[in-house]
């Protein structure tokens, strides 16, 4: 399953490149950068190879998500889908051997093993407050 996720991530990057090259302004960029139709054809060929690797069921889900979102495959870190920034339920934790999707946005998820740096707790500056011993001027 890891190989399929890697293929999906590469496919997503290729699709982004191809989308950029198909924009009207890309024609000028192609001339400036030196990209040609031959390079675009090479990218499309590589895409077809990846499509065969991924398989029809997963590819169908990916294509559907690409129509809805710019990024169909999103990282999940610390139990949070970084596509929609929603914490996933504990019971939905990644299971080995299967492709996970976000319960909220539906994106295909891949785990990121980097630790999350938690911000330091704010410290209170200044003098500590004095305890009130009673009201001034009160008569008992």
Image (spheres, rainbow, N blue to C red):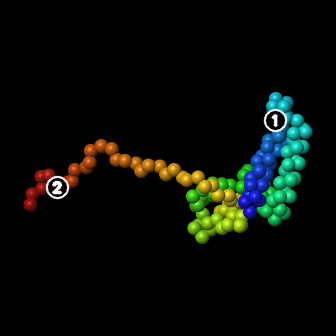
In the rendered view, would you say 55 is above or below 37?
Answer: below
Which one is in front, 2 or 39? Answer: 2
Q: Earlier in the sequence, mark 1 or mark 2?
A: 1
Crowd tier of the residue under label 2, counting other residues whose Cα lies within 10 Å: few below 14, some 14–19, many 20 or above: few
Q: Secondary structure at mark 1?
A: loop
Q: Residue sitting at 76 percent across and 58 percent down?
A: 3
Q: Quadrant of the N terminus?
A: bottom right
Q: Position of residue 78 (x, y in %)?
A: 57, 58
Q: Is the residue 19 above or below the residue 66 in the image?
A: above
Q: Is 120 situated left or right of 44 in this image? A: left
- Residue 85 seen in this snapshot: no
| Residue 130, horizontal then vertical, whole percent | 22, 50
- Name the residue at the top extreme: 32
Q: Position of residue 43 (x, y in %)?
A: 85, 45
- Residue at image point 84% right, 63% down: 56
Task: Kindly identify which numbered label has been placed on residue 131.
Answer: none
Q: What element does badge 2 sit on?
A: loop
**Residue tagged by mark 1?**
25
Residue where numbered disc 2 is placed: 133
Corner quadrant of residue 99: bottom right
* In-image side of 132 versus 91 (left or right): left
**Mark 1 Cα shell of 10 Å, populated few (<14), some (14-19), many (≥20):** few
Circles 1 and 2: CB atoms closer than 8 Å:
no
Farthest-out residue, left: 140
Foreground: 52 or 92?
A: 52
Observer-nearest residue: 98 or 84?
A: 98
Residue 32: x %, y % from top left: 82, 29
Residue 102 in view of the camera: yes
Q: Quadrant of residue 68?
A: bottom right
Q: Quadrant of residue 88?
A: bottom right
Real-space Cα separation, disc 1 to disc 2, in angstroms: 74 Å
């Amino acid at each position: 399953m890891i190989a399929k996720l890697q293929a999906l991530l590469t496919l997503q990057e290729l699709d982004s490149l191809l989308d950029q090259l198909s924009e009207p302004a890309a024609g000028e960029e192609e001339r400036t950068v030196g990209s040609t139709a031959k390079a675009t054809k090479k990218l499309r060929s590589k895409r077809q190879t990846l499509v065969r690797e991924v398989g029809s069921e997963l590819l169908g889900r990916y294509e559907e998500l690409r129509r809805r979102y710019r990024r169909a495959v999103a990282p999940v870190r610390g139990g949070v889908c970084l596509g929609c920034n929603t914490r996933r339920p504990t019971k939905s934790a990644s299971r080995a051997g299967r492709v996970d999707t976000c319960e909220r946005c539906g994106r295909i998820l891949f785990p990121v093993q980097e630790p999350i740096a938690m911000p330091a707790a704010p410290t209170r500056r200044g003098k500590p407050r004095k305890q009130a011993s009673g009201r001034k001027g009160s008569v008992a």
